């Protein structure tokens, strides 16, 4: 009889633990909030972040990320004048852009020039580039003044939790994927959301990031991109698809890129119709970096 009572108590305890586990799993799933904005992973404090990381570590064995970057293929048939102009720009940007790979910068500039020619972006001379192949421990976002050849801002930026942890490995345009989507974006208007000042993003690469508005992918602030978080954990936390920014830099960055600006999220496997070197060379010859 005592054995039956013990078994019953054990079953009730097991059911309770199972319910708690299912509840945690449900809380960690999903991409979009009921209010329509993609929220960052909820980390109200560093202590809460630590608790979350403990849960995740218990669920998934830690596997060190390789730090070897994915090679970026050089664009084909880049006219000599365009290639030289990008190389000169990279030289002018100086030490602040030393970690910005020349191949990534060239692709970003080619896309910017074609988007200007097509009227898809309207803010002249400003280009934001994020190399999402770099680990999130690195400041991998640059906001550039192309005409002055200067770095306006450099900062860390988070990738989506569906893309990976320290390194972003998977990219997706799919709603509720919680992944970062690569490609060229037009910066849209600002609004006050649950993360404070935020700027909407419109994806300009069909099939690769054109669900950005429907996914509520925006530039916003996040505590898990702060200096304190990076110092403690050695990397940023993960968003649900947004390129989240540090709390002490987000306002300046959102202001610098402005409305109608160009943001390029670079990463492995990216193809874009805007990477037309010949068209970019014609635009540069006609208008310069304007």
Image: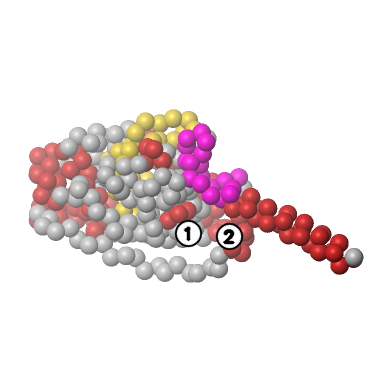
Q: Is residue 81 magenta?
A: no
In front of the other: 237 or 99: 237
Residue at image point 73% right, 54% down: 16
Label 2 vs label 1: CA separation? Answer: 11 Å
Q: Is residue 11 above or below residue 151?
A: below
Question: Can residue 157 be seen at all in this image of the molecule?
Answer: no
In this rendering, does residue 30 appear at all? yes
Residue 165: percent from left, percent from top: 47, 59
Q: Which-is-in-front pick, marks 2 and 1?
A: 2
Label pair 2/1, CB-CB below 8 angstroms: no
Q: Nearer the viewer, residue 146 or 49?
A: 49
According to the picture, the residue beneath numbered tag 2 turns out to be: 56
Q: Quadrant of the N terminus?
A: bottom right
Say if the magenta span includes residue 34.
yes
Q: Which residues are magenta?
A: 26-44
**Residue 253 percent location from the top left of the image:** 39, 40
Relative to 131, 56 lies left or right: right
Secondary structure mainly formed by the magenta segment: loop
- Label 1 crowd (10 A; few <14 / some 14-19 / many >=20): some
> How are the residues colored?
secondary structure
**Numbered badge on residue 165:** 1
């Amino acid at each position: 009889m005592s054995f039956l009572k013990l078994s019953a108590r054990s079953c009730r305890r097991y059911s309770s633990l199972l319910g708690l586990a299912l509840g945690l799993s449900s809380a960690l799933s999903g991409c979009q909030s009921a209010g329509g904005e993609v929220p960052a992973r909820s980390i109200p404090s560093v202590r809460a972040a630590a608790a979350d990381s403990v849960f995740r570590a218990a669920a998934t064995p830690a596997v060190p990320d390789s730090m070897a970057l994915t090679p970026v293929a050089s664009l084909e048939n880049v006219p000599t004048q365009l290639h030289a102009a990008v190389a000169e720009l990279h030289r002018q940007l100086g030490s602040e852009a030393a970690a910005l790979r020349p191949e990534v910068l060239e692709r970003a500039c080619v896309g910017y020039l074609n988007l200007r020619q097509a009227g898809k972006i309207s803010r002249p001379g400003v280009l934001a580039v994020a190399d999402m192949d770099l680990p999130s421990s690195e400041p991998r976002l640059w906001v550039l003044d192309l005409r002055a050849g200067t770095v306006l801002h450099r900062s860390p930026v988070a990738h989506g939790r569906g893309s990976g942890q320290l390194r972003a490995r998977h990219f997706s345009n799919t709603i509720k994927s919680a992944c970062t989507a690569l490609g060229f974006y037009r910066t849209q208007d600002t609004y006050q959301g649950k993360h404070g000042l935020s700027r909407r993003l419109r994806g300009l690469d069909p099939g690769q990031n054109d669900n950005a508005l429907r996914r509520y992918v925006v530039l916003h602030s996040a505590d898990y991109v702060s200096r304190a978080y990076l110092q403690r954990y050695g990397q940023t936390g993960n968003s649900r698809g947004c390129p989240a920014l540090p709390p002490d830099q987000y306002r300046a960055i959102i202001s610098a890129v402005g409305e109608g600006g160009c943001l390029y999220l670079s990463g492995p496997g990216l193809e874009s119709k805007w990477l037309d070197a010949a068209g970019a060379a014609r635009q540069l010859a006609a208008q310069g970096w304007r």
